[in-house]
Image (cartoon, rainbow, N blue to C red):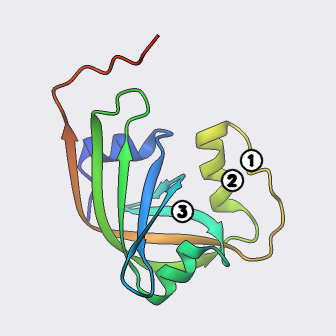
Amino acid sequence: MAFDPKVLALLSHPNFAHLSTLMPDGSPNTTPVWIGVRDDRIVIGTGESSLKVRNLRRDPRLSLSVIDFRDPYEEAQIRGRVVEFRDDSKFEIIDEISRKYTGKEFPWRDPAGRVAVVIEVEKARYTKLPFEYTPPA
């Protein structure tokens, strides 16, 4: 699925996402994550032993919520599924994502178990609520 330009803008900036996966009993588990975009897919770098990977290997369905860091009233809600677990022991994907968020390579350099989760988006919705973000001084 090709991204709506407004959704792609949210995904392309260093906005945090919240990834929801399903536990074995069907209950949700939500984790904040960094995200990257490759072609028309979302990628997340993580460790093979993480709960999110264990959940997604059992059930590839997921949802993501992305909020604009500067204006939390601008958001994207995404549903999709994992289409690939890609070896990232050379840090190609996680370094790219880390540079987006921190300007530097990913600091933890143990290649054992590094994996990139490749997500195909099935539905994406962009919303901009009509409120002005006024953080407390």
* Mark 2: few/some/many CA within 10 Å (<14, 14-19, 20+): some
- Residue at 37% x, 77% y is 27
100 and 130: which is toward the camera:
130
C-beta proximity under 8 Å, tags 2 and 1: yes
The residue lying furthest to the left in this view is 130
C-alpha distance separating marks 2 and 1: 5 Å
C-alpha distance separating marks 3 and 2: 11 Å
- Disc 2 secondary structure class: helix
* Residue 126 in the image: above or below residue 88: above
- Residue at 49% x, 81% y is 55
Q: Where in the figure is residue 133, as x and y percent of width and height?
A: 31, 21
Q: Amino acid at mark 1?
A: Glu
- Disc 1 secondary structure class: loop
Q: Is residue 53 left or right of residue 130?
A: right
Q: Which residue is mark 2?
A: 95
Mark 3, mark 2: which one is toward the viewer? 3
The residue lying furthest to the right in this view is 110
Residue 136, image quadrant:
top left
Q: Is residue 75 left or right of residue 131?
A: right
* Mark 1: few/some/many CA within 10 Å (<14, 14-19, 20+): some
